[in-house]
Amino acid sequence: MSDSDSAIEVKNLKVVYNEGTPNEVVALDDVCLNVPKGQIIILTGGNGSGKSTLVKAIAGMAPVKSGKVFIHGKDVTGWPAYRRAKDIGFVHQDPMLGTCPNLTVHENFQISLEKPWWLPTPYPLTLTKGQLDSIDKIGLPLAEKKATQLSMLSGGQRQSIALCLALRKGSILLLDEFTSALDEQTKKAVLLYALSEAKTMKATVIMITHDLAMAKELGKESGNVVLTMVGGMFHQWKVTKREITGRLKLTN
Amino acid sequence: MIISLLDISLQQCFLYSIAVYGVVVSFRMMNFPDLTVDGSFTLGGAVLSSMITSNYPPLIALPVVAAAGFAAGSATVFLNRKLGISKILSGILIMMVLYSINLRIMGKANISLLRLTTLFSAYDTDDALKVLIFCGISVFFLICLAYLSMTRLGLFIRATGDNEFMVQTQGVNTDWLFYIGIGMANALVALSGAFVVQNQGFADVNMGIGLIITALAALIIGESFTAALVSIKKFIFSKKTIDIFSNTKISLLPWSTISELFSALTGAFLYFLIISICLRLGLAPTDLKLATGILVILGISVRLRGPMVETYVRGRL
């Protein structure tokens, strides 16, 4: 068992893609990370530094060779992605991956509800008025588009729905460059919405971004931590705030 | 002559439409190009005919047929999900394996059901009543599937066909959905085989060969027909553009799935009507597969220019 007040704990994680083939890539080696509950981490770093791999390994979508992943103190290393999804909301960088294009907006929301399987859908949307309003501000009038097929919406709108679905899911939110498909203005609105929702839900967030200016701006807010990942086999974590320095294991 | 043509096509279409529903579930709802159906159709006929010749009542044989079909579909899903064989190859493998299994079940290449009690043997003389009963069976399965697609399980099945990754990130084990969906599709196909055997009075080990093409031909013809109906409706009500953004009403029914099921039924009818007209015009029965193939090619190529282009953009079939 692990420290119970940490939301995510990664111990000596090693991730190898295409193992045993000439294309073998060691994406992460001996990485340790301990994220307390309610912490917001902004993760930056160059291409290929293993940011996405780390987040995918936490969500159960990367081939973990050795090491352990704990979520809320439970060892989930051997769990498949769908079992971890009860605690984890994941937003992928590709807007096409987070939603079902041939279903309507309303049907997409139905999927995340916990209801008996034999009853007919749809159930009423359970978003609050405040949530609906803030989604309106992002540029997605949900109330008007409930019956619209998702393939009719733009990438940004689909990404917003993927974010809403992830926010409804759990206490941990993993955002993998989810704003890369959005325009500048929508990007900021969606980011701030995600972080404010996460704060009111007291969710733990790991957010990957390539936008360094944005990362710095968000890092100024109290409580947020900005981490930079440097590529290669060994990873050095550069911590700009003090809160979790002691819990990071610096390798190499 | 028209009456007899209609009669034959109606009888066949209602029984084969159940297999087409199965293809709708696997190809359209789950996006799984499942070729097992060639084997499971014969499997249904084989199980039913061997049970009837061993003096089991047909009503007890039907659940066994459905279970056998479900097992065949699950085997395909097992090969695909657990052993990592591609969807098409696992379907072909199980189809091939089923050929031998069907021969084992039947004991010989064909079994005659003449003078044995089947579900329909009481109505052999009354063709109109027979058509009515077949229609009832087909509509029963259509309503069951329409209800299923309304439920949460149906929603999961449709969503898995649409974007499996998304369903997984919502905490659902998609492997089970594939077992249920493809199993159910093959159970429907096996039941269709069992009904066809009881109607024609014999089971043959080769009766399932090319069924997938027949079912797809029927489905594609039906889809083109439904699309034509929709455009006629739009023309009559002169609604030139579809205003998607004013679409605020939520309908309880998933119309896309229900129109697919409706297409399956009408397509099966049109297909058998076309085939019986071809036969009446002097086409040799051995050329039927060629005619079916040409029909599928025509159906797809005409539809590509027609109003159903969107289906292709979605990458389905």
Image (tube, coloured by chain):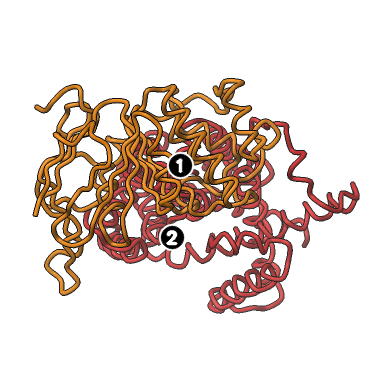
Chain colours: A orange, B red
List x then y, in percent, for residue B64. Answer: 34, 39
Q: Residue at x 53, y 74 (%)?
A: B289
> Is residue A194 toward the left or the right of residue B63 in the image?
right
Secondary structure category for the residue under label 2? loop
Identify the image quadrant of residue A235.
Answer: bottom left
List x then y, in percent, for residue A176. Answer: 38, 48
Q: Residue at x 54, y 64 (%)?
A: B214
Q: Nearer the viewer, residue B93 or A56?
A: A56
Q: Amino acid at mark 2?
A: Pro
Q: Nearer the viewer, residue A71 or B232?
A: A71
Q: Nearer the viewer, residue B317 or B24?
A: B317
> Is residue A16 toward the left or the right of residue B175 in the image?
left
The residue marked by circle 2 belongs to what chain?
A: B
The residue marked by circle 1 belongs to what chain?
A: B
Q: Amino acid at mark 1?
A: Ile
Which residue bears the numbered disc 1?
Answer: B157
Crowding at label 1, few (<14), some or many (≥20) Cα neighbours within 10 Å? Answer: many
> Is residue A184 toward the left or the right of residue B100 in the image?
right
> What distance separates the C-alpha of mark 2 from that of mark 1?
15 Å
Q: Residue at x 13, y 54 (%)?
A: A29
